[in-house]
Image (cartoon, rainbow, N blue to C red):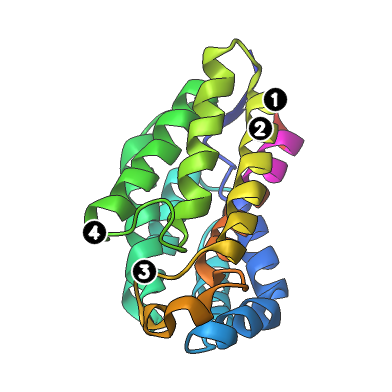
Amino acid sequence: MQSISNTGAGVIIQDIAAVIVENKAHLSEIDGKIGDGDHGVNMAKGFGRAADRLDPLGTLTDALGVLSDVLMGEIGGSMGPLYGMTFADMADDLGTTETIDAVAFASMIRAGLEGVQDIGAAKVGDKTMIDTFVPAVDAFDAAISQGKSFSEALAAMKIAAEIGRDSTVDLVAKLGRAARLGERSRGTLDAGAVSCCIILSTFADSITARLS
């Protein structure tokens, strides 16, 4: 059975942070079309600070906890609390699990999704990160239920995240600052959906590279 050790998996969060920082300008450019234009700046600041503070040789559980604390306590905008709660619930769910296999990962990402849903009102179709997150988690679960391997399920999650991200182009924003634009919010990606896709896709790539 494919798996990774929780110990030493803190580096996965550093991998995610590196891609977020790399996409700082891109995320802010997208956000600037229908929002405040600060999504990339805030995300890069939060993930970058967390990456500097976590132990890459430590557990994924601890790294998720560090990331959550930074996002909830040190960055502005609405996404800090939303992502902060996501990663806090992932950390709580993973806990002292020593070996992360497909079942453990499925539970972890589902907990993260439920965490953000508990504090936000967004649904699929509202042009938010949920449009990426829900289909990605559902695709992972579906792959596992079909007997697919951990790596195959991660690949399915990544594809679903990309499709979900791209679906936001044709949606009208229902929540947040962008909602004030009404129909004018149609025609551009949602920045939160894009950053969520980056996070889930990098999770998939980083874990796949370490599976044994």
The reply to whether dot 4 and dot 1 touch (C-beta < 8 Å) is: no
Side of 112 where 148 appears, left or right: right
* 10 Å crowding of disc 4: few (<14), some (14-19), many (20+): few
Mark drawn on residue 152: 1
Mark drawn on residue 156: 2
* 10 Å crowding of disc 1: few (<14), some (14-19), many (20+): some
* Residue 205 in magenta stretch: yes
Residue at 66 percent across and 32 percent down: it is 156
Q: CA distance from mark 4 to mark 2?
A: 27 Å
Closer-to-camera residue (31/196):
31
Upstream in sequence: badge 4 or badge 2: 4
Could you tell me which quadrant the C terminus lies in? top right
Mark drawn on residue 104: none
What amino acid type is highlighted by mark number 1?
A: Glu
Q: CA distance from mark 1 to mark 2?
A: 6 Å
Upstream in sequence: badge 2 or badge 3: 2
Closer-to-camera residue (85/180):
180
- For label 3, the SS is loop
Magenta stretch, main secondary structure class: helix
Residue at 37 percent across and 33 percent down: it is 96
Closer-to-camera residue (30/174):
174
Upstream in sequence: badge 1 or badge 3: 1
Query: Of circles 1 and 2, which is in front?
Result: 2
Q: Residue furthest left?
A: 118
Q: Residue furthest right?
A: 209
Q: CA distance from mark 3 to mark 4?
A: 16 Å
